[in-house]
Image: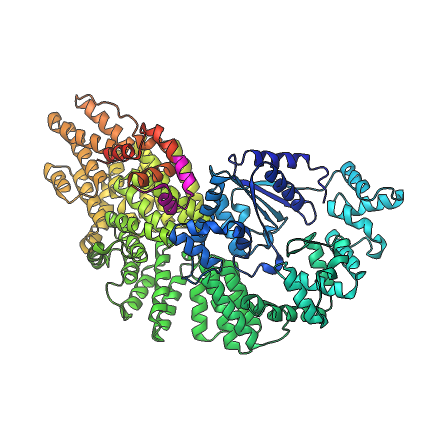
């Protein structure tokens, strides 16, 4: 197709090819036949002339159910580089592409392998990736391309993709610059028509221009047929398909048969097409059978491959064929593909009109192989088709539920709900499975809290059937809901009763986590005992560490929460489990921020936000955003803190996500305290303790006692604060929660100050809680100065200032400086911490480099190419005034000390 009238788009693509490091790529959008593929092809040709290596993949409707088919097509020319990949990436990619057997690969590890391979190729020679018709790419390949697109930063690597208007694809949200293609202007359309059909009768020319309405493909193809044959009321796309069908009808019958086979074959292989055609015709055939189709500009023949000149041509041929003709072609392809069981199963299925358990079983086996390669979407499609062909209703339901389970694991809620609905009336066991599956999305944040009680009953019935593991999964899902929502005391107790009756060991990490989420105070003592027993094994199993980190946060053991979450993160990265990694990172960021370890909290929160957005977890992302707001408030970055808090609140209010809203209110309280708005601070923080407020969260409400007490004292609300403490003291009597007891000791000392109470607060074990120790020193020093014990006050105020300076807690450090000046001691202004000169992303890379990791190892940890890591380090070194990794490690170590 020519590119008349596309000068602006051609210029943009030319600039992209000339400077591939400027942006990650372009997504060309438009209706069918508008010229997307022609524009991408011109970009590829220009790139080749400019010396770039061009790698291509094209989506095909028939290949949508073949996992990683598009990725295989893209990477085949560079397959020699797979052997140089790091072992986990190499194994994941080879398994995904069906080149070796291995454990089911993580989609994110496959994505990282593809990114590393492409970046390595680009280091030798700049690379242009052209992905045509991405709306027809198999989902696994599209996910990998989106993963790569999001991470192209400084590599000489660029992606040009095309997509049909209105189609869905992960690449829509991958950060590619959109390039919408519209129809041609009237004068350009006339010029194009005249170039392909000169000397037309003026009346016919006018009719063609009106019918085409600026559509490039219509302008080039409609002149070949009689417009009157199709009338004027058909949509343009359907009219074009009929145009192509009419052209096919004029070809010899053997050629029509070969074209039908080619249209139904997903690979474009000429050898396969000829073999299947020969099977239908009962006689050997040669490539010459396609000559008339080539002459008619319907197909093009390449090196062993047949390509339709446009997807509408491909779809028009089966549409014009009879059902019997299509079935015969599908069966011929199935016979030809005996050595390729997955493709054979699909062709058999498409040729089968009614139930056929043999074909259903073949599809089920294909689904297992697709899942083994990490192709969840392909496995779902195969299982759903197998269900349609199932003879036994029970087998049909089981296949649909297995497909729904895969949809849940892939985060595809609408698909899972549709599959469960399709399963119809279910027996109690299958109904329990369906309920468990559908309760797995977003931790049930959007559901009615009453649903938690129903899940308790479901867990009880599943356990009664002896399915203890399934019952535990249901309980864990219900327990997570107790974090995001408030079901009430009776529902919580019912969950505990079911958990207590399960025949699992008391130190089972899931049981510990369930108890922590459901009853953080009533079971706090037992949970803390278990956590301390298990702390020595942190790092052995990332899944266990993730459970225990979450449990630790619930019971106020933020030091243990940070320890377990930090141990979980590397293992989850190595396994490619980017779906649960944001959860561990959010726990890590929340806990470190509360401990005052901002240097550790900043990169964890930033990465949690990014990965939560990428993996479709808005509420976990909202929680991490709220932590970022808290960090900004503690750093004295008030404007940024307010903006982040507002953004997090919008995410939390969407479904009443209580932990998000609680952290937002904590941030606003910190902001008001640092700005001297003490009445506002008390009002903001008190909301956390009001059961009727959406910011109330059973566990987190007890972990802001120190801030609330300070606001109360500053506003004369001491009696109100005493009443609050009277409500919290009974909780402290049943749990040794570190955060609760630290807050209560501080509150007692500040409300009724004395040397003994402050000494008791400082005598507690605060080794892992430096911010809290600094806060006590500050309050003690302030009280001593007000008691005219100025000399004694200075030591405490100086300790507080030094602590807060070291932690980067700017607001508290400035308050300590002010108190020191009032005590008659000058206090030097704190210079910016070198770490504060870095972005959160840069800080993550700097810390890993300081730990001795190579660029490639850092890339594996952070799911970046090693080239991107190197570029970031080149920016980091001058910011920190260092010139080597050794200097970097020494600088960060000195700051940590």
Judge whether 390 appears above or below 188 on screen.
below
Q: Is residue 64 visible?
A: yes
Left or right of residue 39, residue 681 in this image: left
Left or right of residue 619, residue 570 in this image: left
Residue nearest the observer in this picture, 512 or 30: 30
Residue nearest the observer in this picture, 33 or 460: 33
What is the quadrant of the N terminus in the image? top right
- As drawn, which residue projects farthest toward the bottom? 392
Residue interval drawn in magenta:
853-872
Asked if residue 176 lies in the magenta stretch, the reply is no
Judge whether 782 appears above or below 226 on screen.
above
Residue at the (79%, 57%) spot, across then down: 247
Q: Position of residue 125 (x, y in %)?
A: 51, 39
Q: Position of residue 549 (x, y in %)?
A: 29, 53
Left or right of residue 736, residue 296 in this image: right
Residue at the (72%, 37%) spot, across then down: 5
Q: How many marks?
A: 0
Asked if residue 868 lies in the magenta stretch, the reply is yes
**Quarter assignment of residue 868:** top left
């Amino acid at each position: 197709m020519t590119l008349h009238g596309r000068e602006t788009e051609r210029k943009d693509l030319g600039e992209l090819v000339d400077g591939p490091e400027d942006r990650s790529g372009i997504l060309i959008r438009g209706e069918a036949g508008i010229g997307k593929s022609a524009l991408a092809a011109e970009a590829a040709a220009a790139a080749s002339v400019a010396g770039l290596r061009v790698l291509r993949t094209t989506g095909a409707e028939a290949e949508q159910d073949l996992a990683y088919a598009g990725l295989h097509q893209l990477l085949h020319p560079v397959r020699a580089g797979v052997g140089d990949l790091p072992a986990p990436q190499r194994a994941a990619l080879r398994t995904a592409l069906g080149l070796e057997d291995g454990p089911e690969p993580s989609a994110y590890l496959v994505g990282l392998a593809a990114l590393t391979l492409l970046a390595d190729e680009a280091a030798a020679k700049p690379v242009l990736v052209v992905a045509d018709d991405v709306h027809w790419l198999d989902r696994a390949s599209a996910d990998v391309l989106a993963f790569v697109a999001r991470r192209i930063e400084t590599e000489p690597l660029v992606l040009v993709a095309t997509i049909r208007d209105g189609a869905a694809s992960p690449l829509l949200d991958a950060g590619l610059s959109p390039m919408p293609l519209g129809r041609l202007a009237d004068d350009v359309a006339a010029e194009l028509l005249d170039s392909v059909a000169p000397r037309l009768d003026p009346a016919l020319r006018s009719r063609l221009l009106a019918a085409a309405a600026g559509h490039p493909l219509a302008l080039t193809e409609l002149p070949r047929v009689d417009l009157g044959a199709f009338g004027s009321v058909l949509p343009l796309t359907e009219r074009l398909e009929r145009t192509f069908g009419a052209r096919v009808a004029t070809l010899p019958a053997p050629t029509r048969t070969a074209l039908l086979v080619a249209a139904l074959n997903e690979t474009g292989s000429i050898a396969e097409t000829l073999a299947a055609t020969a099977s239908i015709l009962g006689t050997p055939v040669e490539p010459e059978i396609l000559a008339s189709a080539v002459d008619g500009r319907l197909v093009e023949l390449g090196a062993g491959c047949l390509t339709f000149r446009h997807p509408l041509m491909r779809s028009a041929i089966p549409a014009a064929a009879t059902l019997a003709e299509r079935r015969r072609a599908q069966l011929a392809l199935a016979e030809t593909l005996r050595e390729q069981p997955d493709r054979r199963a699909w062709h058999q299925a498409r040729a089968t009109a009614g139930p056929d358990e043999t074909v259903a079983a073949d599809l089920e086996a294909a689904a297992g192989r697709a899942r083994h390669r990490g192709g969840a979407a392909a496995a779902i499609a195969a299982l759903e088709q197998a269900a349609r062909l199932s003879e036994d209703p029970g087998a049909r339901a089981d296949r649909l539920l297995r497909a729904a389970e895969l949809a849940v694991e892939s985060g595809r809620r609408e698909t899972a709900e549709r599959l469960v609905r399709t399963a119809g009336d279910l027996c109690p066991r299958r109904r329990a499975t369906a309920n468990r599956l559908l309760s797995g999305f977003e931790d049930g944040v959007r559901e009615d809290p009453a649903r938690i009680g129903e899940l308790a009953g479901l867990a009880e019935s599943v356990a009664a059937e002896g399915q203890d593991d399934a019952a535990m999964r249901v309980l864990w899902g219900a327990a997570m809901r107790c974090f995001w929502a408030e079901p009430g005391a009776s529902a919580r107790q019912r969950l505990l009763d079911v958990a207590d009756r399960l025949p699992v060991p008391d130190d089972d990490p899931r049981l510990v986590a369930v108890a922590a989420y459901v009853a953080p105070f009533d079971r706090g003592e037992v949970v803390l005992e278990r956590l301390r027993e298990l702390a020595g094994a942190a790092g052995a199993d990332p899944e266990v560490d993730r459970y225990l980190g979450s449990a630790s946060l619930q019971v106020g053991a933020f030091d243990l929460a940070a320890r377990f979450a930090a141990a979980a993160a590397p293992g989850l990265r190595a396994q490619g489990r980017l779906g649960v990694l944001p959860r561990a990172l959010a726990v890590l960021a929340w806990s470190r921020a509360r401990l005052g370890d901002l240097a550790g909290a900043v990169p964890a929160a930033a990465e949690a936000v990014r990965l939560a957005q990428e993996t479709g977890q808005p509420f976990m992302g909202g929680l991490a955003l709220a932590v970022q707001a808290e960090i900004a408030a503690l750093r004295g970055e008030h404007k940024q803190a307010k903006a982040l808090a507002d953004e997090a609140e919008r995410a939390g209010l969407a479904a009443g996500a209580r932990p998000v809203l609680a952290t937002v209110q904590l941030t606003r309280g910190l902001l008001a305290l640092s700005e001297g708005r003490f009445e506002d601070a008390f009002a903001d923080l008190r909301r956390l303790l009001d059961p009727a407020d959406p910011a109330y969260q059973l566990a987190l409400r007890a972990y802001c006692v120190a801030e609330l007490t300070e606001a109360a004292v500053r506003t004369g609300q001491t009696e109100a604060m005493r009443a609050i403490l009277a409500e919290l003291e009974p909780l402290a009597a049943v749990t040794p929660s570190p955060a609760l007891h630290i807050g209560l000791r501080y509150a007692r000392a500040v409300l009724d100050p004395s040397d003994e109470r402050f000494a008791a607060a400082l005598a507690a074990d605060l080794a892992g809680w430096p911010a809290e120790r600094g806060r006590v020193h500050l309050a003690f020093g302030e009280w001593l100065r007000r008691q005219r014990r100025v000399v004694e006050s200075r030591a405490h105020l100086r300790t507080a200032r030094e602590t807060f300076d070291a932690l980067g807690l700017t607001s508290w450090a400035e308050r300590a400086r002010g108190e020191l000046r009032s005590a008659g001691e000058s206090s030097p202004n704190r210079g910016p911490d070198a770490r504060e000169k870095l972005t959160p992303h840069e800080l993550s890379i700097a810390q890993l480099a300081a730990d001795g990791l190579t660029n490639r190892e850092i890339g594996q940890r952070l799911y970046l190419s090693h080239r991107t890591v190197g570029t970031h380090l080149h920016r980091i070194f001058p910011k920190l005034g260092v010139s080597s990794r050794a200097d970097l490690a020494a600088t960060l170590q000195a700051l940590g000390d």
